Image: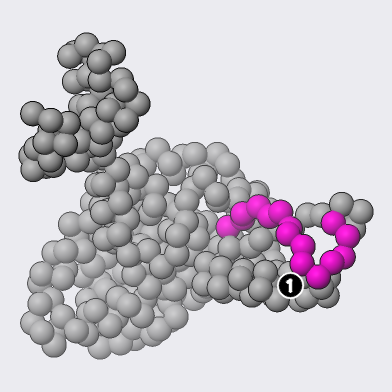
Amino acid sequence: MTINEITRALHELKLPGMAGCWDSLEETHQLDKLTLREGMQMMMQYERDTRQNNRVQRLIKNANFRIKASIEELETDTTRGITTSSVSDLCTGNYITNGMTITITGPAGTGKSYFACALGDRACREGIKVLYFTMNMLIENLKLVHLEGRETNFFRKISSHDLLIIDDWGMVKLEGQIQHDFEQIIDDRYNRKATILASQLPISDWYNVFQSELIAEACLDRIVHKALKYQLTGESYTNFATYTEDYLRSERVSPELVNGYRPEYTLQYTARLFSFSEKEYPKSDNIVIPFTHSF
């Protein structure tokens, strides 16, 4: 068989990693320098790595995160409510294994969504099935499945995921059937599957989210009792982004550069922390400014 025929055969056998490795060895003229054992070991490792990476990407895609986030880019700061040691503990995944609940509260723009999505991203990279909803998204899905008679399958789908993230919790009052649905979701996951709730409301105000006092007591008892609680504080990164944009304009930075960052400020709550002096970067009509990520 020719080189191309071998590549096609590997693809037909659904071995894209091995096919890629074969092509790479051919391009670098390594095929004749490796023994059969060495070549097979290398190709099998490529295939294993390719399948693992594809699985992770599918998990991230199916999780449907609102923003792209990662633990590696998460800023840990005791004054903001996230310590390095606590993040390290979360990265072990024990909270998922033990079916625990995490609550993340704080004012708008302090990084709650980023923190939640970063934990979800880390879980996906460990091969864990994650599902992300904003509270509005969850309510709309619940209304739709009731109309279509698919609520049983929907609840089964949610309970099958090892980690459920609900963002913007408490922004909408739960009434009627929706509060019963939410109670069922929480009850199905209690002590079995992990849940993360991110909210602008302090936990003391969560009772008022429910129309029914009995349902409120039942849900909050399960949510809050053994939860890991994170209270984020500090200046809003959203406000900081607006301030930074105004500052850049005052420094005569090109409009294209400033406007290019705006979607990341507003949609990802990601701050660009600029650090420079006038001596290093004198005023000009078009300057490039170094930046680092924060959450």
Left or right of 255? Residue 154 is left
- Residue 226 drawn above or below residue 106: above
Depth order, front residue of 98/93: 93
At x 37% / y 63%, what residue is drawn? 65
Q: Quadrant of residue 152?
A: bottom left
**What is the x, y in percent for residue 62?**
26, 60
Depth order, front residue of 8/216: 8
**What is the x, y in percent for residue 180?**
22, 78
**Which range of residues does the magenta coloring cover?**
281-295
Left or right of 18? Residue 149 is left
Query: In the rendered view, how is the structure colored?
Result: one colour
- Residue 237 drawn above or below residue 37: below
**What is the x, y in percent for residue 254?**
73, 72
At x 38% / y 59%, what residue is drawn? 196
- Residue 125 drawn above or below residue 179: above
Instruction: Give, as a three-letter code, the residue at label 1.
Output: Ser
- Circle 1 residue: 254
Question: Is 178 in the magenta?
Answer: no
